[in-house]
Amino acid sequence: MSVAEKTAKKSGGLGETVNVIFQALILALVIRTLLFQPFSIPSGSMRPTLLEGDYLFVTKWSYGYSRYSLPFSPNLFSGRIFGSSPERGDVVVFKFPPNPSLDYIKRVVGLPGDRIQMRGGQLFINGEAVSREKVGEINDPDVTEVDRPVDVFRETLPNGVSYETLDLTPNGIGDDTREYVVPPGHYFMMGDNRDNSTDSRFTVGYVPEENLVGRANIIFFSIAGGASPLEIWKWPTELRPWRLFNFVR
């Protein structure tokens, strides 16, 4: 084989490698933009449903696409394309309205036009109390974030969606609120950890439909103790295998 042929072969091999890498990056970008986005839980606001150290997939097509569906949220268009409305009880990732560079995750409890209020720790929707039943206690700091037993209540929304909430502090600051009237095109979000959640009762406010990123779908990894998934040597003690591949409800 001549020197020229060897050079051409090397150039062809390099070009092919670059082409494969480029195609892989484009495919990853398309999947992240249109299909799935990985998301890690940064705080305890959704305990006991979601824990810090949970890693989950968010389905991007659930509510259609807005500029916030794209990396870096370029202001290319307004509103949503192929939009559909979230259902009451969905766990949703959205852009924090006061600062859209931040991702938040909460549960939808109020739809456009709803009247939402907390009275004595109980959720009221349009003047009707949401079913709330004490189902026991959790005495596990990995779940509750506190070293004592915590009361657990099961809420069931009018559409039948049921989930557990924590009551860390009876008569907490968010247990009694004014009545909120959700504007058109907006949603009212709350965390399941009712006494430790910055949500629509506080600085989050009403969340515009455009800010919705996607629906939390399935936990694909979970590790405790603030460990990174890359710290494999911590897996024997910190991995939560019972949470892997659980659907978010």
Image (cartoon, helix red, strand yellow):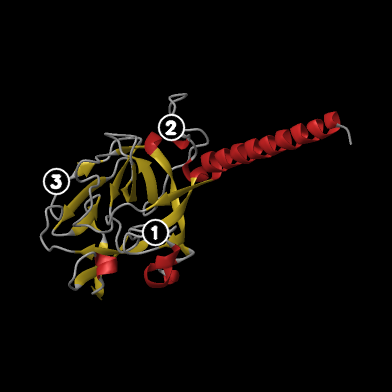
Dividing the picture into quadrants, the one containing residue 184 is: top left
Task: Determine crowd level at label 3: few under 14, some 14-19, many 20+ residues with C-alpha closer than 10 A.
Answer: few
CA distance separating discs 2 and 1: 23 Å
Q: Residue at x 52, y 43 (%)?
A: 61
Of marks 3 and 2, the one in the foreground: 2
Q: Position of residue 146 (x, y in %)?
A: 19, 66
Estimate how packed mark 2 is, as few (under 14), some (14 to 19) or many (20 or more) residues with alpha carbons within 10 Å. few
What amino acid is found at the position of numbered circle 2 in the picture?
Phe
Q: Position of residue 40 (x, y in %)?
A: 39, 52
Q: Secondary structure at mark 3?
A: loop
Sequence order check, earlier mark of 3 and 2: 2
Residue under circle 3?
Answer: 178
Residue count near mark 1 (Cα–Cα under 10 Å), binned few <14, some 14–19, many ≥20: many
Q: What residue is rendered at 26% in x and 34% in y?
A: 98
Looking at the rendered image, the quarter that the C terminus falls into is bottom left
Q: Which mark is residue 54?
A: 1
12 relative position to 219: left or right: right
Q: Secondary structure at mark 1?
A: strand
Looking at the image, residue 163 lies above or below residue 30: below
